Image (cartoon, grey):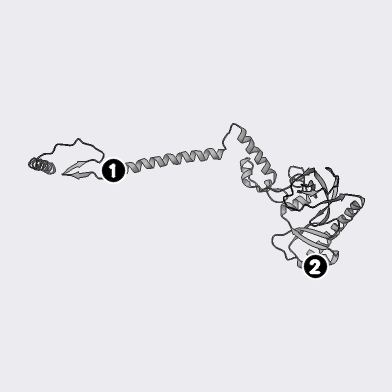
Amino acid sequence: MPDVVGIRFKSCGKIYDFEVNGIEVKEGDSVVVESDFGLSIGRVIKGRRTVESGGRELKKVMRIVGEDDIKTDEGNRKLEQEAKDFCVERIMARGLQMKLVGAESTLDRKRIIFYFTADGRIDFRELVKDLAARFKTRIEMRQIGIRDEAKLIGGLGVCGRELCCSTFLTSFEPVSIKMAKRQDLALNVGKLSGLCSRLMCCLRYEYEGDMESIATDDEIPAEEDVREEKQDSRISEVLSKLEQSDAVEESIETPPEKVSGETIEENKTEQPKPEQPKSEQGEQRHKKFKHKRRRFRR
């Protein structure tokens, strides 16, 4: 199991593990590492520790940053500004619908990365040829989102402080208008949006804090949950009434059975009568028929 340290290349960027390669490093040191793009300078954020490689090949720390590396890095800052100015010029000359955000060069100048934003796909093949002919190195065009643009440029939010994304947020989480509604904020998109014209990131972690306080406050249910419970109880009450009415209608619509001119209800139980001779039964039927006939005449 190799010994690694956690290294970050940009402020508020992600932390990557690199094998120490037998070099004594500690937190806060600036080191030169072998990245996927070439040699780069990073800062040690997490100290030395042992991890399992998991079959992956870890990049290595090459050396502690020296004076020569510092001078080279300062020269690269000038190169990046020159590359940015030239790229903006060529973008305008070719009429490309894209906005250049920044340029970044590796320590060994084997690659220059250009960051830009655009509404859709951009055919920048001719632009890459212009840049490669000018700087004689490998060119990479990387399209980023509008929130990443705010993170790279930085600025001040409506609260008067530096942007969260450029100071301590290392990744972006989804933010929805529901989070503002739960906090009883005015649903004014203009006031809830940051410099990137998207909903402010702080809505999310303030929302999570409010939800935690609500959950621990004697388990008080949310207003929407109470409303839903009331609606469910009303619906169940209406359904029970409908079932009762259906049962009454069914009992009314079910006709009684007719047996020998008499009506006998389905659920009514009677004691069995002793059998009578057929002659007596005929006389009784004749009497009942006369009685009904008289009632009909009346």
Q: Quadrant of residue 85?
A: bottom right
Q: Please state which of residues 151 and 64 is positioned toward the viewer in this rendering.
A: 64
Q: Quadrant of the C terminus?
A: top left
Task: Tell me the residue at 52%/39% (across/down).
Answer: 227
Q: In the rendered view, would you say 245 is above or below 114?
A: above
Q: In the rendered view, would you say 288 is above or below 140?
A: above
Task: Tell me the residue at 88%/53% (across/down).
Answer: 73
Q: Are marks 2 and 1 in contact (CB under 8 Å)?
A: no
Of labels 2 and 1, earlier in sequence is 2
Furthest residue toward top: 218
Residue 55 point in image, percent of width and height: 73, 52
Q: Amino acid at mark 1?
A: Ile
Q: Nearer the viewer, mark 2 or mark 1?
A: 2
Circle 1 residues within 10 Å: few <14, some 14–19, many ≥20: few
Q: Please state which of residues 45 and 112 is positioned toward the viewer in this rendering.
A: 45
Identify the element where label 1 is drawn.
Answer: helix
Residue 204 point in image, percent of width and height: 67, 43
What residue did someone put label 1 on? 252
Task: Tell me the residue at 39%/40% (across/down).
Answer: 241
Identify the element where label 2 is drawn.
Answer: helix
Q: How far apart are the alpha carbons under marks 2 and 1?
A: 89 Å
Q: Amino acid at mark 2?
A: Lys
What residue did someone put label 2 on? 129
